[in-house]
Each structure stands twice: as C-alpha cells, then as structure tokens.
C-alpha cells in the first residue's frame, strides 16, 4: 500500500523500511523450514532482472566514466531492481496478490477524486496543493490538458496506471463472470475507476482505458452472438477509419506541450543512436546522459522507457528484457489462462512505454505480481486457482 500512495518515498518514508521488514520476517520464519523455490526458468529471470541488469549498468557506467561525478540520486534505477526478489517470498508463501493490488489501488481513486472535489470547493488551495504534491513530493501532476476541442483539468497521480488492473478485474466480474453478489458496488467502483483514469489526462491512460473496455465489450458480444460481434467489429473499424486523422492529430500534435516533449525525446534518441553505434550495442550504463531537444538540455532519464532501456543497457540486453516482460502473456495464452490480469498487463506495458514508472520500485512490484501469479496459477473456468482456492 505504501508503494501505491508514496511511490517516490517522499511522504511516509517507509518503503525501504517495510521492504526490510518483509525480508526479515519471512527470513526468520524460514530458518527451520524448507524453502519452496520457483521453477528454474523463473529463478533465472529473477537473477537476470535483480542482479545482472543493475550490476551490468553499474559496470558500464564505471567503464564509461559516467559515475565519477554523478550524484547517487541520479542513478534512478539501481535499488528498484532488488524489489523483484520479492517473487521468492510470494512464491514460497503462495500468497495471492490479486485482492491486495485491486483493493490498494482503489486509494488512487479516493485521492484523485478527493483532490478534484477539493479544487471545486476550494479553488484557492490549488497553488498550496501543487507546491506540496507536485513540486515538493513529486507524486502528482496538475494542469489543463487539451484534446482537440476539449480542455479539461488533469489530476494525474503517479501510480494511476495501476488502475488498469482493477478496471479489467471489475469488467471481468460484471460482463463475463456475472456475479450476483454486490453488483451495485462493482458498478460503482468501475465507474469511479473510469472517471479517475479519464481525469488523469494522459494519452496512455486514456488509450488503455478504451482498449480494456472495448476488449471486454467485444468479448462479451462474441460470447452472446457471433453476428453481433461481426457487426460491432465492422462499426468500430469504420469509426476508426473515419476518425484516424483526428486520432493521429491528437496523439502527435506538436503544439501540445507534453507531445512536443516526447517527440523531442524520440528524435533525440534516434540522433544519439545514429552517432553512437558502440553504445547502442553495449549501452551507456548508469549515470550516462544525452542531449534531448524535448528538455533542451542533457538528461539522465526520459519518459520513453523502452528507448531509455536501449540507451542504458544496449540492444541485446533490452531485447532479452522485453522478451522477459512479455513472457507472462505468452505463458498465459499457451496455458489457456488469459485472465483480467493478462489484459491489464498488456495495457500496463503500453503505458510503461511513455512513463518511467516501469523501473520504479512500484513498477517492479507490478512485475512481482504478474510473474508470481503467472507461474503459480492454473486455469479453471476463467478463474485462477491458487493453492486450491479459486480467485477472480
């Protein structure tokens, strides 16, 4: 929960304390018990992500002399990788994180909608909250965002991308599982999630929101009526073709500040890679910087995560890492266990492409959840089975 509401560890300052306590409590309990190890393939993945990647980047940073005059705070990735080791604990205890993730992320709704209502009632507090949450703590972004003719107040909480998991979960419950219990509560929470993602204002969040909703609507239609599914697919295709120019304008409009910055980053990456073939292959390592026209200065990190991964680690390691990232999706499809988590994870990886969230400790916790679940569960009537107990 601390990783949800305090992703930068600047509010409660408990992230590493809690991480240490979890390791200590689990470790003390395993002194006289047998450790349940994950499958060998997962162990190799854990070792690659938790140890090889950070120490390779550290080594390349030293070889390239980038670390000599670099503040440790600038090495933004290093300590986050160790959170991936929590897979050992999750797998050993058989603990299912589904309910924890879905319930704790609902705090993002309370925070976002609470701030929005507070601004409506007390607009004079906008600057005060902006200074505390945006400037001092860096856990949120406020501002006006324009999409074509629509201008809206954006309230983006740093961990709002995690809402794709409860979004897919509740759509699965409502449309596919058709649970009769607490349907009103499910509809209410689903509506709150949709509103919160809409208010977050980022294109990646909005595209992911639309993708997940359309996925479940199409799946529900397909199961109800094949002709209706074909008709729906045709209508959606025609709408997309008709609106494609508008969509592309919104996504790549250079007059919009956020777009201009990202496009500047993208062009600068291409220019950097074209001039630095050796570092394109081996990477700069930690502490390295490059000039980005998006910021109009040297920078050590940008929002374009996958290109940033190439810059830091090089093409071969980035290729392996991306294969690791998509492994749970491939495994779920192969095992016929493509659940709401799989759908949400696809959306999450899309969001991560334009957000440095993936390499944060909170982002690593998402990978812990997805990988531990993927290697722990078996398929049973669109539900997952963990230690003999059916979960949604």
Image (cartoon, grey):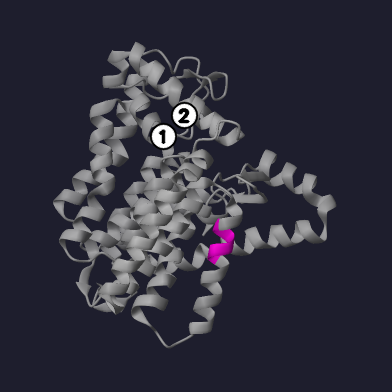
Q: Percent position (x, y) of residue 290?
A: 46, 18
**95 to the left or right of 261:** left
Q: Which mark is residue 78?
A: 1
Q: Residues within 10 Å of mark 2 (few under 14, many from 20)?
A: some
241 is higher (above) or lower (below) than 35: above
Q: Is residue 95 above or below residue 319?
A: below
Estimate the x, y position of residue 44 in percent, counting from the top left: 19, 44
Mark 2 touching mark 1, by CB under 8 A? yes
What separation in Å lies between label 2 and label 1 (alpha carbons)?
Answer: 6 Å
The magenta stretch spans which residues?
Answer: 193-197
Quadrant location of residue 253?
top right
Compare residues 16 and 185 and report the one nearer the observer.
185
Foreground pick, 36 / 101? 101
User: Is residue 383 visible from the viewing direction of this image?
Assistant: no
Is residue 291 located in the magenta-colored stretch of the structure?
no
Prevailing secondary structure of the magenta residues? helix
Determine the secondary structure under disc 2: loop
Question: Where does label 2 land, which residue?
Answer: 75
**In this picture, is 94 found above or below 149?**
below
Q: Mark 1, residues whose alpha carbon is within 10 Å: few (<14), some, or many (≥20)?
A: many
Residue 63 placement (x, y as % from top left): 33, 14
Q: Quadrant of the C terminus?
A: bottom left
At 55% from the left and 48% from the top, the residue drawn is: 158
Q: Secondary structure at mark 1?
A: helix
Image location (x, y in percent) of residue 143:
68, 44
């Amino acid at each position: 929960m601390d990783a949800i509401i305090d992703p930068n560890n600047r509010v409660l300052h408990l992230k590493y304390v809690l991480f240490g306590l979890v390791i200590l409590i689990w470790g003390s309990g395993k002194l006289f018990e047998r450790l349940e190890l994950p499958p060998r393939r997962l162990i190799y993945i854990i070792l690659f992500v938790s140890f090889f990647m950070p120490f390779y980047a550290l080594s390349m940073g030293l070889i390239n002399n980038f670390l000599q005059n670099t503040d440790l705070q600038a090495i933004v990735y290093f300590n986050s990788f160790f959170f991936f080791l929590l897979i050992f604990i999750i797998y050993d205890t058989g603990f299912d994180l589904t309910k924890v993730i879905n319930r704790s992320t609902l705090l993002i709704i309370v925070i976002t909608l609470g701030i929005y209502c507070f601004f409506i009632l007390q607009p004079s507090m906008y600057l005060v909250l902006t200074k505390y949450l945006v400037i001092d703590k860096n856990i949120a972004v406020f501002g006006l965002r324009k999409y074509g003719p629509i201008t809206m107040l954006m309230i983006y909480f740093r961990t709002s991308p995690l809402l794709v998991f409860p979004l897919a979960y509740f759509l699965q419950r409502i449309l596919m599982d058709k649970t009769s219990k607490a349907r009103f509560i499910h509809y209410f929470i689903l509506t709150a999630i949709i509103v919160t993602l809409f208010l977050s204002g980022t294109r990646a969040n909005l595209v992911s929101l639309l993708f997940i909703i359309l996925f479940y609507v199409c799946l529900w239609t397909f199961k109800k009526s094949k002709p209706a599914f074909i008709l729906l697919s045709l209508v959606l295709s025609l709408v997309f073709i008709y609106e494609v120019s508008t969509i592309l304008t919104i996504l790549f409009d250079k007059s919009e500040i956020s777009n201009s910055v990202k496009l500047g980053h993208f062009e600068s990456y291409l220019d950097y890679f074209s001039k630095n073939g050796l570092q394109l292959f081996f990477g700069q390592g930690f502490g390295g910087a490059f000039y980005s026209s998006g910021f109009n200065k040297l920078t050590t990190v940008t929002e374009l995560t996958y290109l940033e991964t190439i810059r830091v680690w090089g093409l071969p390691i980035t290729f392996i890492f991306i294969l690791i990232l998509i492994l749970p999706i491939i495994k779920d499809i192969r095992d016929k266990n493509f659940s709401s988590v799989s759908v949400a994870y696809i959306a999450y990886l899309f969001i991560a492409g334009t957000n440095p969230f993936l390499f944060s400790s909170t982002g690593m916790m998402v990978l812990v959840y997805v990988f531990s679940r993927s290697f722990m569960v078996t398929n049973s009537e669109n539900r997952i089975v963990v230690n003999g107990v059916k979960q949604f």
